[in-house]
Image (tube, grey):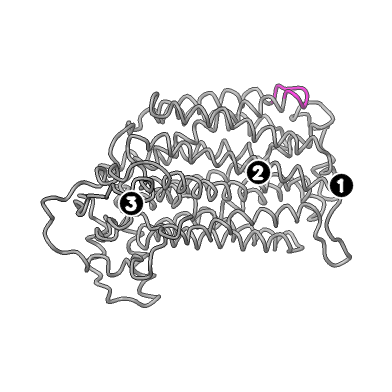
Amino acid sequence: MEENFKMSRSDEYDPLIANQEESSDVNPDAVPYEEALKETGYGRFHFKVLALCGWAVSSDAIEVLSVSFLLPAASCDLDIGSSDKGWLNAIVFIGMLLGGYFWGSLADHQGRRSILMWSLTVNGIGVLASSVVQTFWAFLLCRFISGIGVGGSIPVIFSYFTEFQPKEKRGMMISALATFWMCGNIIAAGLAWAIIPRDIGYISSSFKFSSWRIFVATCAVPSLSSAFLFTLMPESPKFLLIAGKASQAIKVLTKVHDSNFSHRKSKEYKIKSLILATDTSKAEYLEQHNGNDVGCIAKLGTGCTVLKESTKQLFRPPLLKSTVLMLIVNFVLAFGYYGLWMWFPELFSRMKDGGSPCDHSNFINQTSKNETTCNYKDNWVYFSGFMTALSNLPGNILTIFLMDRIGRKQLLAMSMVLSGVSVFFIPLIHNKYENLGISCVFGAVSTVGWNALDVLSAELFPTSLRSTAFGIMSGIGRIAAILGNLTFGELIDVHCAIPMIIVAALLVFGGLASIKLPNTTKTDIH
């Protein structure tokens, strides 16, 4: 990252004094934000912000999905059964539920960049701590803390990235950013395959740091490195404009322009004044707090008030219909995807000798806490997990090229319906190769829906509410993921067809509901 993207201390956004700076009448030469953004060109800066935000998205994916690869190994060291595994999968989402709502609202109030740095740091610290604790309950607590960090970074990353994208390229670029979740999945699966089956680590009578704990510690590197790299980036200019800091927004846009046109020094950025957005509810609110309350308690109270007011606006016309539909779609997609995806390594482990995943006799002994089979050194489990992660690649490539051609909600609806249909076939398979094939089909199709949902979430809501909306959508998704994992944990040993049918029905229902969402293709963001 270039040094010229660092913002000086005086340029940093202070939400409590945001509107003191600019109170003069609008300049007649002022231009709308979308036009000013288009004048910055498209080039080196945008690819840098894609790379950095993409690395942050990958770090979140690694943290969330790494848990699934721990199940066979953690069963041995932590002495846990299927119900405990359900909680181990769910605890990250519980943390994400709380973190997404809180961090997202703070980002709408205090700025995107600083919240990203803090949430990514919390994630990394939680992951590192979980690699060394020795008891199941301490491990759960650390994963909960890391989940709080992940819950904050996911919604804010997409808000930050979206606000740098011109509308002509927004759908394609948000789709490109969403593909980094797949990259994180592949990295997590590759690291698990490379590290967990190996005889490495340190084991004594009082302390264990075996191969799967080394894998956990390694997964902390992406989030901590992302937190550091965001110190080199500017605040979102769209956020600064809505907050009443138009001069700072122009400074950021000028730096973006200079980076994109660094090979043409004679070309100057001509925009000197911006039209303040009509969506000024946040700026108006902040103007009522003229920086008089600067203590930590006062800031916390202000943040809670903003959180409440932002949430109310999402559940009022004209946003009410979109909010409710997005909550439904987020819930069913997260319940189905995470409820099934997080259990794939466990299903691979149970089917390594053949048979159906719903054949109770194949794994009844493995589900007993006292008779856990320590088979996590079997390469098939991690090879299968890696191939399933790699299956996301075709769907991600497809969405990059089709998002602006077919449309967001159309891709979302088709993906969810086809994903639901594929899940119906899982109880009917008879060997591990068929299981791997169905898993890859599910991964390839479902990722299209997630990418379309990410784009819709970024475009449906105005700037002053975008991170709050992302936080709420993420929150309902985390509730669904928690319920999905706990449902699998409780029902998979009864008969695996039961949770599979539930997942399939919900995905089809959510796909049909998504047809009612508004069309946001190539529209201005508010």
Q: Amino acid at mark 1?
A: Glu
Q: Nearer the viewer, mark 1 or mark 2?
A: 2
Residue receiving disc 1: 371
Residue receiving disc 3: 465
Find numbered disc 3 in the image and state the secondary structure of the residue it sits on.
Answer: helix
Residue furthest right as drawn:
205
* Main secondary structure found in the magenta portion: helix
Q: Is residue 139 magenta?
A: no
Residue 425 vertical placement versus 190 (above, below): above
Residue 292 image offset from top left, x and y in percent:
27, 76
Of labels 1 and 2, earlier in sequence is: 2
Tell me which corner region of the image, top left, top right, bottom left or bottom right, holds residue 6: bottom left
Residue 414 image offset from top left, x and y in percent:
47, 24
Residue 46 vertical placement versus 12 (above, below): above
Residue receiving disc 2: 187
Of labels 2 and 3, earlier in sequence is: 2
